[in-house]
Amino acid sequence: MFDKTSAVRADIRYVRNSGVALAYQLVGDGETDLAYVPDFVSNLVFGWGSARWRDFYEQLARSFRLILFDKRGTGLSDPGGQFAALETRMEDLHAVLGAAGSSRTVLLASHEGCSLAALYAATYPERTRALILFHPFAYRPEGQSEHWRLRLAELRERWGTQELADEMLRDTVPSLSADPVEREWFANWLRVGASPAAAYALHRAWIETDLREVLPAVRVPTLVLYRAAGNAELHARDVTALIPSARSLRVSGRDYQLMFLSPEIPEEVVRFVAGAAGPEVPDSVLATVLFTDIVGSTERAAELGDRAWRELLERHHALVRRELTRFHGEERDTAGDGFFATFDGPARAIRCAQALIGAVRDLGLELRAGVHTGECELHDGKVAGLAVSIGARVAAFAGPSEVLVSQTVKDLVAGTGLHLEDCGERELKGVPGSWRIYRAASTETAVPPSLA
């Protein structure tokens, strides 16, 4: 039932990221900040109207300063046009935590929200005190992905109907499925949580995201919670094995969704955080690396002569630095006519590379570029490690005006609108195994994230 008298227990606040307004709340005054990353859909007002959600929030707020928010496209937050990619939603979380004044945060995430929380923890370990994941999964096997893709169109057509809500409740929360009051509440929870288009986009991104290369880069204390529900334990153990030093814990219940149905979870979160101590200065982070260089530079230099070539390089460098600033990239090294830069997310790196290719054509130059996402080591402000080598090797395969990316990048850009063409497997010099490479389809105009 929806309790109007308890609809809002904290004021609704908004912060903007790239022009999109994100709704959030601050509850409690604990010394430690905890942000709850919701499962698929949420609605800050409707959540407080549920006795179960209200009790869950209040239990957490007794021990923490609780930060609640609606992801873009859900609840009270703006949709933001095309549904955001995982890295954009990570930036939304960064904006919310910044607005809340939270510099080091415990992240508690459920189901689909685990992907966002894990990516944030790997990218910003210095800002993440601990990570608690309820029913995460590393990847969806191809057979299961096909099953879900077949259901996506049906989901968009039937979203919001009582019939679909009943089916979902029977599949994921069978303990509540026979109660007509719970059935009505669950259907309304889905309706106020997301539109049909947003629900479709969320599920599609969830199906297509693969975190197997991201999870080993999580270096903060991590607890994985699961119930005896379907394949939940199998997925939990996969995730636990991939995250260094993570541990798993089975909690009560046999339902797949709705974290509040395990009443001991807030207490387990408090206990885990009390014993968690992450590194103050991380020695590794998850980052996207971009390598570019000029095609045929030696021949062009010989044709122009030293002075003219040097002047052309200066103009090239100015253009590259302009685009890096526009797409929030960080220049790491420059060697001759090549650039090495890092980004917080792969979609921005790809779009930056595409913009660079278009920009330098006016100088009569062609670039090649390579993009990879992986765990990078930090040494005295320098970025190093195998991920950097892979990025450089991927770039070496690129032809004139081509942007090539690794399989890891492809697995993280679901929902971005980027089209990646399979170029097959390649062996990368000095890198074990074979790697599947993809070509980013050319675009007339690359748009920075603030305009996407």
Image: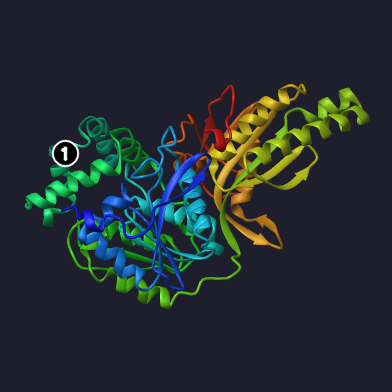
Dividing the picture into quadrants, the one containing residue 325 is top right
Dividing the picture into quadrants, the one containing residue 305 is top right
Q: Residue at x 63, y 47 (%)?
A: 342
Dividing the picture into quadrants, the one containing residue 368 is top right
Residue 435 visible in the shown view:
yes
Image spot of residue 46 (x, y percent): 26, 51
Would you place residue 273 above or below residue 172 in this image? below
Image spot of residue 54 (x, y percent): 26, 61
Residues packed near mark 1 inside 10 Å, few (<14), some (14 to 19) or many (20 plus): some
Q: Amino acid at mark 1?
A: Leu
Image spot of residue 62 (x, y percent): 34, 73
Q: Residue at x 33, y 52 (%)?
A: 44
Q: Residue at x 84, y 29 (%)?
A: 312
Q: In what element is the residue under mark 1?
A: helix
Front in this rendered view, residue 339 or 277: 277
Front in this rendered view, residue 181 or 7: 7
* Residue ID for mark 1: 164
Q: Is residue 310 left or right of residue 44?
A: right
Q: Is residue 140 left or right of residue 256?
A: right
Total marks shown come to: 1
Would you place residue 283 above or below residue 287 in this image? below
Image spot of residue 110 (x, y percent): 33, 56
Front in this rendered view, residue 118 or 193: 193
Q: Is residue 151 left or right of residue 106?
A: left
Residue 227 visible in the shown view:
no
